[in-house]
Amino acid sequence: MSAEHASGRGLRRSAPDPERDRERSSVVEKNATLPSASPGPATPFKIVPCVIVPCFNHAASVPGLLEDLSARGIPTVIVDDGSVATERELLIAAAHPLPWVHLVHLERNGGKGAAVTAGLRWAKEQGFTHAIQVDADRQHRVADIPRFLEAAEGHPDALILGQPVFGEDVPLGRLLGRQLSRVCVFLSTLSRRIGDPLFGFRLYPLEATVDLLDRANLPSRMDFDPELAVRLCWRGLPIINLPTEVSYPTGGISNFRLWRDNARISWMHTRLIAGMIPRAPRLLLRRRG
């Protein structure tokens, strides 16, 4: 296991923005040919994937998650998003014995979007071509990771989104919120290409994704996942939706703040629907094509 404390001065990028990304990270040495960012299927090639796990005070669930991931044989980076000292020590203890796990510490809590952004930039800098985002609370079925990788090998330019299959334990409020977000994303993309904009189990093609992060000022909290999916859709990336089961472990901890995060997501949808207007002709032409 390797670990590094982020300095807070910013990750490398072509257009520095300290508000968007303050953290620096590095660990592994890997090299791979990056895929083309142009839309549409490309000639199959060997992808070089990693797993990114954003984590804020979820240390109790991480050992079980790492045990689940151990069978996948994929390098994994846990991005500690400014957890309290006791949680940080537990993360170090869980990751230390595992050479395939890399731990990046952010000095202060910036939100899920900030943690994922730090992980994506880290992965790109280390030469990975694709990154699979998995939440730390073990709601995602990591046994489905091979299906995501298989889809990426056939469509290396595609954004691959998990399409959640809920059980009876799903809270009703989550279902209603997702339905509303789907409607808003349909309005902002003029398509149904994005099956579930809020679901965090997904695979990013790093070349196109990090390029977008360099050019757009994305939010750093819970509104990050849906906005990134919409903006990649605007860019014309192919999108694949893969059904995958979701579970809600007993005693699970959620970092979602009902009023604050719903307000952020509502404002995000408002901005994106407004941003659709000048893009509407191109989006409609793409639908017809």
Image (cartoon, helix red, strand yellow):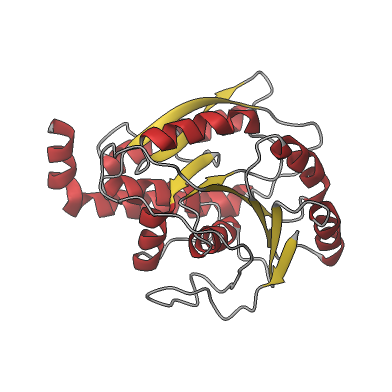
Q: Foreground residue, 174 or 98? A: 98
Whether residue 108 is visible here, answered yes or no, is yes
- Above or below, comparing residue 35 to residue 245 in the picture: below
Residue extending farthest bottom: 9
Residue 176, given in percent of the width and then of the height, sits at 52, 30
In the picture, measured across the screen, residue 217 lies left or right of residue 261, that is: left
Q: Quadrant of residue 191?
A: top left
The one of 267 and 113 positioned closer to us in this rendering:
113
Q: Is residue 61 left or right of residue 186?
A: right
Quarter of the rendering occupied by the N terminus: bottom right
Residue depicted at 50% across the width and 54% down the height? 128
Residue found at the far top of this picture: 168
Q: Residue at x 64, y 29 (%)?
A: 143
The quadrant of the picture occupied by the C terminus is top left
In the rendered view, does 72 fall on the left or right side of 269?
right
Q: Position of residue 217 (x, y in %)?
A: 40, 66
Residue 151 position within the rendered picture, expressed as x and y whole percent measured from the top left: 43, 32
User: Can see residue 162?
Assistant: no
Count numbered badges in the picture: 0
Q: Is residue 286 left or right of residue 234?
A: left
- Image spot of residue 25 (x, y percent): 61, 69
